Image: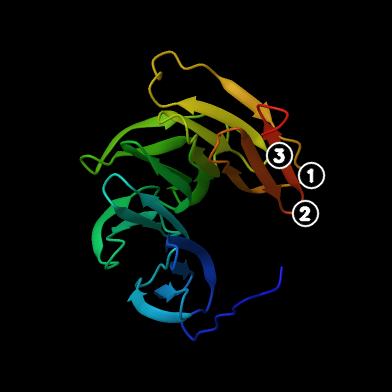
Amino acid sequence: GIPKHTHRSKNLTDALCMFPISPTRLLIGGHQTSLIDLDLTTMTEQAVVDTIDHGCAIMRKYDRSRFLCCGDVNGCITLRDPLTLNEEHKLLTHSASLNDFDVQGNYLISCGLSDSHGKLSVDRHLKVYDMRMLRLVSPIQVLIDPTLLRFLPSFVSRLAIVSPMGQLQLVDTVELTEPRVCMYQINCASQCVSFDISSSNQAMAFGDNTGQLSLIAGTSTP
C-alpha cells in the first residue's frame, strides 16, 4: 500500500510495540523512556508519558476493568488508565524477563524467564494473576518452553502457548485437576517469533525469523 503518513519524533528511539486505544488514538512504546499517545487525525503527539527505566515491550487492553496493561522486559506489568495513562497498579511476574502475556476473563497469564543462581532459564510455569483481586494465584505448568501465548477469543478458559521450535500446546485454565494434553507441531522453517489468533477463532498464524508465515485452521474456509 501507499504510505499515508510517516511519524518521526525525538521520543521514538527504539519503538517496539503499539496499541490502537481508539480509531483515532495510537499508543507507541518500546525500549525507550516514553510511552507516546499519537493522535491519528492530526498526527501529533497528544501526550508523552515517562516509563522510567524499563520502557514498554508489550501492550494489552483489559476491557473488564478498563486497564491498559504494559509489560516491560524485566518482568513487570504496569496497569494504566487508558484515558489518562496514569499508573494504577504494578504486577511482578517473572524474575528475569517477560516473554509474553495475555489477559481475558478474570485472568492475566504470562510466560518468561527466571533467574536461578545467576543462570537464566525459560520458566515452564505460567504466572497467573486474578484481576479481580490483583493477586498471584496458582501457576500453570506446561510441557514446552513457552515464549508466546494467547487466549482463544471464543473460550475464556482456553490458552494457546507456543515455543520457539513451533510447538503449540492448548491449556485449559479450568480443568487443571486432570489436564488433557493437546499438542501440535507447526511447520516453521526456523525459530517461531510471532503468533496470533483470528477473532473468529478459526485460524492461527505463526511467523518465523526467515519471514515465513504458517496458517493453521479448523475449517477449509476460515
Label drawn at residue 110: none
The quarter in which the N terminus is drawn is: bottom right
Display coloring: rainbow
Residue at 26% across, 68% down: 84
Q: Who comes first in sequence, dot 2 or dot 1?
A: 1
Real-space Cα separation, disc 2 to disc 1, in angstroms? 7 Å
Q: Kindly identify which residue carries mark 2.
A: 210
Label drawn at residue 189: 1
Tell me which amino acid carries mark 1.
Answer: Ala
Towards the viewer: 43 or 143 = 43
Residue at 46% across, 61% down: 19
Towards the viewer: 124 or 178 = 178
Q: Who comes first in sequence, dot 3 or dot 2?
A: 2
The quarter in which the C terminus is drawn is: top right
Residue 143 in view here: no
Marker count (numbered): 3
173 lies left or right of 203: left
Q: Quadrant of residue 26?
A: bottom left
- Are the residues flagged by discs 2 and 1 in contact, CB closer than 8 Å? yes
